[in-house]
Amino acid sequence: MKPTVGLFGLTGCAGDQLVVLNCEDQLLDLARLLDLRDFTMAASEPDEDCPLDIAFVEGAVLSARDERVLRRVRERARCLVAIGTCAVWGGVAALDRLHDRMGLVREVYGDAGAAFDTLPARAVHEVVPVDYTITGCPIEPAEFLSAVGQLLLGNLPIPRDTPVCAECRMNEVGCLLLDRGLPCCGSVTLGGCGARCPALGVPCIGCRGPAPDANVEGALAAFAAHGVPAEEARRRLEMFAPLPAPVAAEVA
Amino acid sequence: MSRIVIEHLARVEGHGGATVELVDGEVEDVRFDVFEGARLLEGLVRGRTYDEVAPITSRICAICSSAHTLVSLMATERAFGVVPSVRTARLRDLLLRGENIESHALHLFLLALPDYVGAPSALAIAETRREAVELALRLKRLGNRIQETVGGRAVHPVTAVVGGFASVPTEEALLELRGALEAAQSDAATALELIAQLPPVDVGRSPTAYAALRLPDTYGYMGGHEFAIAADGRAVTVPIEAYRSVTRERTVPHSHAKHSRWNGTPFMVGALARLAVNDAHLPPIGVRAMEQVGLARPFEDPLDNNRAQAVELVVDVEHARALVDEELAAGGDVEERPPVHPREGAGTAAVEAPRGLLIHSYEYGKDGRLRRADVVTPTALNAVSIEHRLRRAAEQHHDLDAPTLRHHLEMVVRAYDPCISCAVHVLDRRRAT
């Protein structure tokens, strides 16, 4: 029997659901292999109550409404997969930790903002337990499809642990940070993107969040050696996700 | 009193809905509701250096991420007095065509088409009409291939930077793309035929104003320094920098939301607005396409926006091929980028995103950091027009049974191809109500 599946968006840019729809060559096969019950971005008449074998959730939790939706999805789902950097880490919306959030709300929306349903950004795992994560801003189509394949076999895919830097070496691309002095975040960012940006001459901006054993001290030292002050280095490294706590405290 | 509530509108980008209240057959209130959470990105981007701005503002919306990226770069370039090369302009044009092709194929066939055939989704349509869905997916794939070739990634492009491109497509990649574009011409023509054959649905007609970037010559999505608002056969032009005079939000009696109007008339942005403003620049294939889908002034049917998108699909596939040919003839391996010197100053830029006019306006401080950002998105601009057309549809069809009326109302909203992740940047005021 086909597994029942839902795809949900909390607050975000919908880029990860778009990547699913961008699997043009596999989309009809996915529809054949999965019983897509609840995918509001692509289909009306969703079944909003059925139990789900797999729920994919993108976006960060930014409102009480998001939290309600997420808790309900968790109740329904046997396996909850957070997709995209916002769901996995909080993403760019979680930069609100660096600002006076309610001050910004008032500034953008005026006094009416005080009455808004708005909460500080949280990743999905900060609200409910998560069974598996597929990071990326946006997710890589190949990683999504490969995870679906594993889940169909009843396996949880093995999480990746190597940084973008390792993939750069495999691409035989010279180091943007050490050779060209560009502020590349690839040494501490989780790989899986094939080091796309450095291969195109663009420094990694860390859109996939930190690798598990990220050597943040080393990255900060390398940034400093190339004239990037600690404040700027930290700002760049934390655009999509906070640095691991002890190091962040040290830098602060 | 009866009330029709569309809680969570399916087959659109983001979380939104609509509410129509009827009292004795009279429309009492109409609301286009936005439930998207507030990410406050215009605030969060403050204090960043210029190279960090576009990667953050791009995240406002995935489905328009190339348009957000490019208009962001252009606003920064205006602030710093940077003038990119002709080649950069060509590659940016190509990138926007790719996004437009992808977005229109997605909207027309995966989001809007199911309404016309009474199916919940395109995947359901594929069970009986697989070839039509495969055709749409091929066109969508083509748009993404263009964005991957030029921008390095289909969603949130990476190669476009302030001043130009960090890397340019290889000749090999361009030749492959050229082959794909050539093969796609017949697909685009078939897509146009399919849209031309859609059964007419009467959701009410009403005169409206249209706003779009006014292009100097070629039909497309960037270039020019002013936008035009066309109403009653007349057009007024406004310099891009003066956008606030048109988009300035006003309080309207029926809601706490503030709304954009032009001289009291709601205006529409998007493919239909672009045709209304720039049809003189349409290539012959576009003129023929308009005839084929039966598009003619005064464009009073909101569903005409679907037909207008089909016209643009055909135009873009042809024009993208011409751009690739130009790039093959004139390009080279290295992109000449002008130097970028951050300075204090303001810059405003506008492009046409697939769903309409998109404006970014920035101010940089003496330290070269971003001091202020203002983003005006197409769906926010369309909000008044959407409510106006919902009202017209409800007035005209108030005697229909609720499910049918609801279906009509959903079709009206979807025809605007709304992007609610974008819209939230202005419309959140409403959520307080």
Image (spheres, coloured by chain):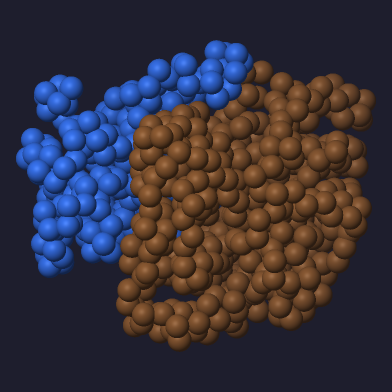
Chain colours: A blue, B brown
Reply above or below: B136 against B386: below
Residue B121's spot in the image, x, y percent?
58, 55
Q: Quadrant of residue A120?
A: top left
In this image, B112 relative to B264: left or right? left
Residue plotted at (35% across, 30% down): A95
Q: Is residue B303 left or right of residue A113?
A: right
Percent of width and height locating residue A192: 21, 54
Q: Position of residue A47 (x, y in %)?
A: 52, 40
Which quarter of the rendering shows the N terminus of chain B? top right
Residue B162 seen: yes
Name the residue at 60% across, 79% down: B318
Q: So how many labels did they put on this image?
A: 0
Residue drawn at x 34%, y 82% is B172
Snapshot quadrant of residue A20: bottom left
Q: Is residue B385 left or right of residue B319?
A: right
Tell me what residue is drawn at x 48 percent, y 21 percent. A104
Q: Using the image as rendered, state which of residue A232 and residue B300 is in the foreground.
A: A232
**Between residues B113 and B328, which one lies in front from this camera angle?**
B328
Residue B248 relative to residue B100: left or right:
right
Q: Position of residue A139 (x, y in %)?
A: 33, 51
Q: Nearer the viewer, residue B428 or A178?
A: A178
- The quadrant of the image that shows the C terminus of chain B is top right
- Residue A56 visible at all: no
Q: Nearer the viewer, residue A118 or B111?
A: A118
